[in-house]
Structure formats: C-alpha cells, structure tokens
Amino acid sequence: MRKFVALALIQLMFVAACGGGGGYGGGGGSPPPPPPPMQTIATPGPPNVETLTVDAGPANGVNQPFVSVKVCAPATTNCKTIDHVWLDSGSSGLRILASVLSAAPALTLPPETNGVIPLAECQKFVDGSTWGTLAVADMQLPVSGETASNLNVQVIGDPTYPVPADCTPPIETTVMTFGANGILGVGPFIQDCGSACVSTVIAGTYYSCPTPGSACTGTMASLAQQVQNPVSVFVTDNNGVIVELPSVGSAGMTTVSGSVVFGIGTRTNNALGTATVLPADKTNAFITATYKGTVYINGYVDSGSTGNFFTDSSFSACASPNAGFYCPASTMNETATLKGTSSSTLTANFSVANATTLFATTSYSAFSNLGGPISDPKALDLGLPFYYGHNVFTAIENANTPGGIGPYFAY
Amino acid sequence: MKLTRCVVCSIVLAATVAAPAFAALGGDGTSVQADLAKLKGGLRLTSTAAFTVHEITTSDGTVVREYVSPSDKVFAVSWRGPFIPDLRQMLGSYYGQYVQAASAPHTGHRHLAIQQPGLVMQSSGRMRAFFGRAWVPGLLPQNFSVDDIN
C-alpha cells in the first residue's frame, strides 16, 4: 500500500513537471524531439479508471503493461482476482492461463458451448499459439469496478482436449512461455476473429470438442460465440480505451504506474480534448506511417508491442540474445508522421537507444527508447515505448464517439 | 459466386491435409502446379528470369506466396493477411527446425525472428493482420535479394 501511494505521488509530480522538455541526451546528429504536450493522467478509481503497472511481471519481461482482473463464475460470488494480466490494444478478448485459474483457491468456470458441444480455440500470435477451451465468466476490474457479464474467455493451456494439428506450435501453455498470467485484449475489434469465422471453418481458429480427451473438430463460430473485447461488453464506457502512462527517462525505470481509462468522451475524465483522431482501416485497423520518406501502409500503435519496430538499414540489430532490438552506437532521435483515412496527421517522435546497454540494468523493466527491426516491409509498429508520456486512445470498431466512429487511434 | 468457390477450396484443403496443399519450403515447384489444378482460381503466377512466384489467395483471405527457383525448388515462402497459415504446410521439412527455434525464450507476442544457417524466418503482426516470410539461404538464386520476398 505504501509503495502504491509513493508511486501515485511520483505520478502526480510527473504531471506537474511535464512540458519542460527532456534533456538533449542524443548525439545521433538529429535534433531532439520537441517537449511533449502537457499530459494529465486520470486517477485510478470508480467508475472507469483502472490501475496500469509496467513491471517485470511473472516472466521478467520488458515494457509489459499489466492490470489485475477479477474473474467470477457467472452470477456467483465465486471469484478470483488475477494479477499481471497483460493489457493489449493489439488483440481482443480476455485469456487466462488454466494453471492460474486452477491454483489454490481454484476457480472453475462453466464451459462455453455452441448450445450443446463445448467450444475451444487456437489463437495464433506471431511467436506461437494459445490453445484452450472457451469458458463463460463475469469479469470485474477491481479498481474501477467496470464489469463485463457473461463474457466468453479463453482458458489457455486447459489440458481437457489435445492440441489440434493445425494449431501452430510452439503452444504457449505456461505463465513463463506466455509471459503473463493472462491477456486483456482491448484492441480496435469487437471479436478476435469477427465475420470471417461466422460462415467458414477457418483452420486454426475455433473448434467444437464433443469428448474430453478426444480430438476437437474445426468449426464456425457466430459473433456471439466468439471471444469478445471485454470493453465492448461493458454497459457504459464501452466505445474504447485510453492508455495513460507517464514519461520514462532515457535510462529506463524499474516500475511505471499509470491508468487505463474506459470510454471515450463518455465522462469528463475521458474527453478527446486536443487529441487528433486518425481513423483506421476497418478491416485491419492499420494507419499509414511515413518514416524517412518511405510510406508504410501497415502502421499501428500497440500497447502489446514491447518496442517501436520499424525498418531502417542505418540501424544494426543487437547481438544475441537481444537480436530482436536495435543497438545503435549512440541514441538516435527519430520521427514518423502518422495518417489515418482522413487528412489529419500526427507527428510521432521516438528515440532509439542501445538495447543491450539498457538491459544491463537488470532491475529495469520500462524503457522509452527501445526499438527493433520489423519483418513486414510495409509495417511500422509504435509499441509501448511510444505510450510513455502520451495518452493514447483506441476506439472500437462501429462504436460512436465524439471523435467519430471507430476504429481509430488518437493522441 | 466467389464465396462459393472459396468454400469449395476449403473443402479441398481439408481433404488434402495428409499431402500438403501448398508446395512447402524446400519442395519441388512442380507439386505447386498439381495443387493449383485442384485449388483453381486463387492462383497467380509471376515469372522473372531468376525466379517464379506462385501466389495463392486462401479461402480465409490470406495471400500465400511461394518463390520457386529455375531449378524448381521452393526457396522462400511468405504470407500476408488476416490469419497465419498452417506453418506445417508452409515450412515442410523445415518445420521441426522452426518449432525448436521458436521455442527459445523471447519477449513479446508481436515479432519473431529466426536466423540460422539453414533457415531464416521472420514473422510479425497482430490480430487480423499478419505477415511472415521464410527462406533457405542455401537455395536462394544468384543475385536474389531477400527484400523481394514480400
């Protein structure tokens, strides 16, 4: 408790101090980024602000923002609060590790069925897949009290059914391999799959599982049967989220405390204010990013990315085991211009420091200047480092907001 | 009308799981021709002197490309779209190597890079929008730039 109060105070100090600009710690020859605009971080509490914490988490990661989530068997007081659930604006749906649910005191959730037969899901992430049964839960966020009733959730690594052959390994079934106790996907889409899975059986997505211990069969899944973005299930404040994290200095920090605010323009604490809206593509939620004269049509802003990932041949990747990040000789200050489907543009300034040097301080888990290569020659991914010092809005598809209909990003 | 054809495609795919529906990395290009005959429609061929690209739009909307050398070997594959394809089919005999390398400790769910003497694989993206590519360095045609695997 004492620690929390101390962090909250530091956060208030950040608010008071911002606008002064950062030191010119660069040396890469490019000018320093201009000072960020004044940032105000909403205080966690009812009815719509949840505590968001960046720390090393259960798997000693970097740049992972976590929330705690209370999960209950529907319409009961049989509940369990789970810490270190990864807040991800690049996916949709709540997924909890089976091993976390079954740890004492165990919580058993009723299976989700297609009316008769239990359903399961393979959710492919880039580095592997999660496999597990679908269950129904009431989700409550412990600080704000925001509630999603009868939510379809995935129970990752539930051993009831064998992993199907078309669910691509490695299958991440443990807290260590998954990197968190669960994931809370609050991205731009209402469901994880959407209309594609409604009328066609898509390999490696949804399955019906008639017999425990026996193979499941690929199945179509209606929108109501799919794993849903919990925010879209809220009664109010259900049109999007704002991730609000304070600035992080060039060396990094052990822990960062901020907020995730639910709803856009639904209350005084979640107004768009001076933020500029970048409408995203309805199919894939991409925006366009222009960097050093090259246009990247697959641009996105994503709290679930641990770095800013972009293509630049002037950067070298770090040596193993940090080859997924850049290791410049000196810190470089870079700029991208973001544009949605409207004419509005936003400037995104970011710094890239030597990741191996940053990681040498092993107690630090939050870094604002972590960058890395991206395999997609059309993509530019502004991840959690970009969120530090910005309040970043993600509006959900088809949802009405004062800034227009989602999906969009804004800051 | 197109939808109907895609449903047929997916049935064909489901029925041919035992024999890969796509020519896999390291496999023969000729098997692609046979698969294409079955799949119909979804295929586009682009040829240069140095290599041929077989582009297949799968029933779920993901575009899969196979890069075939003049000696008729699939030296690279790529995918772009809402779903990651079945990597067992895509990577063929290199699949085990991929699984082993991808199982190494790493951080994050958005980017994967495997760099080994016999296999390079890069994958990125987020829900509903994925891209990935893999190639065998020893099979690349002369003067081929991997930037062309897109």
Image: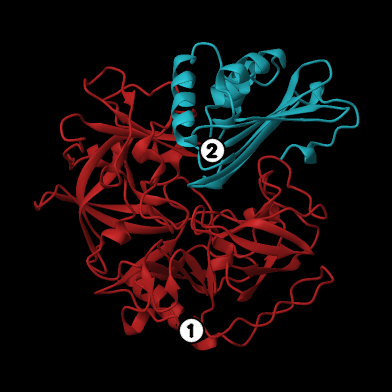
Residue under label 2, please give it: A127
Question: Which amino acid lies under the numbered mark 2 shown in the image of this protein?
Answer: Asp
- Label 1 with label 2: CB-CB less than 8 Å: no
Q: Residue at x 62, y 88 (%)?
A: A20
Q: Secondary structure at mark 1?
A: helix
Note whether residue A226 is visible.
yes
Mark 2 chain: A
Quarter occupied by residue A108 = top left
Residue under label 1, please give it: A15
Question: Which amino acid lies under the numbered mark 1 shown in the image of this protein?
Answer: Val
User: Of residues A15 and B65, which is closer to you in this image?
Assistant: B65
Query: Residue A292 at what x, y percent from top left?
Result: 79, 64
User: Which chain is painted in red?
Assistant: A
Q: Residue at x 13, y 49 (%)?
A: A74
Quarter occupied by residue A34 = bottom right
User: Which chain is painted in cyan?
Assistant: B
Q: As drawn, which residue projects farthest toward the left? A: A76
